[in-house]
Image: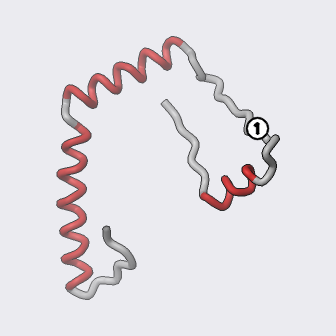
């Protein structure tokens, strides 16, 4: 599985020309083995409850970072 992310600045540059089409692709696009691996990965994520676990762990990490910030450690931003 793969993805491409760009900043709003980059996206705005592409969108300035209404006729511009961002053509892209990958060597593994649509390959049956890559698709099977992606499906197996999604099944495992669901079976093991990894999304919910990540939410729980993320909250714990966020609390710990806010605590460190309150103690005077330099942290610019903690969500």
In percent of width and height, residue 3 lies at: 54, 38
Q: Is residue 1 above or below residue 9?
A: above
Q: Nearer the viewer, residue 8 or 43?
A: 8
The answer to which image quadrant residue 73 occupies is bottom left
Quadrant of the image containing the C terminus: bottom left
Q: Residue at x 47, y 18 (%)?
A: 35
Q: Is residue 74 above or below residue 4?
A: below
Question: Mark 1 packing: few (<14 Cα in 10 Å), some, or many (20+)?
Answer: few
Task: Judge left or right: residue 12 versus residue 54.
Answer: right
Q: Nearer the viewer, residue 11 or 62?
A: 11
In percent of width and height, residue 66 lies at: 23, 75
Q: Residue at x 23, y 38 (%)?
A: 50
Q: Residue at x 48, y 30 (%)?
A: 1
In percent of width and height, residue 65 lies at: 25, 71
Q: Is residue 4 above or below residue 73?
A: above
Point out the residue furthest to the front here.
18
Q: Nearer the viewer, residue 78 or 8?
A: 8
Q: Residue at x 35, y 25 (%)?
A: 41
The answer to which image quadrant residue 46 occupies is top left
Q: Is residue 19 above or below residue 72?
A: above
Give the colour scheme of this rendering. secondary structure
* Residue pointed to by mark 1: 21
Task: Judge left or right: residue 76 versus residue 17.
Answer: left
Query: How many numbered marks appear?
Result: 1
Point out the residue furthest to the bottom here.
72
Task: Judge left or right: residue 32 versus residue 42.
Answer: right
Label 1: which secondary element: loop
């Amino acid at each position: 599985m793969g993805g491409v992310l760009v900043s709003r600045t980059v996206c705005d540059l592409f969108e300035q020309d209404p006729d511009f089409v961002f053509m892209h692709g990958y060597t593994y696009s649509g390959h049956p083995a890559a698709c099977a691996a992606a499906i197996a990965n999604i099944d495992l994520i669901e079976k093991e409850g990894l999304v919910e676990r990540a939410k729980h762990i993320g909250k714990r990490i966020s609390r710990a970072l806010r605590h460190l910030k309150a103690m005077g450690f330099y942290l610019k931003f903690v969500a």
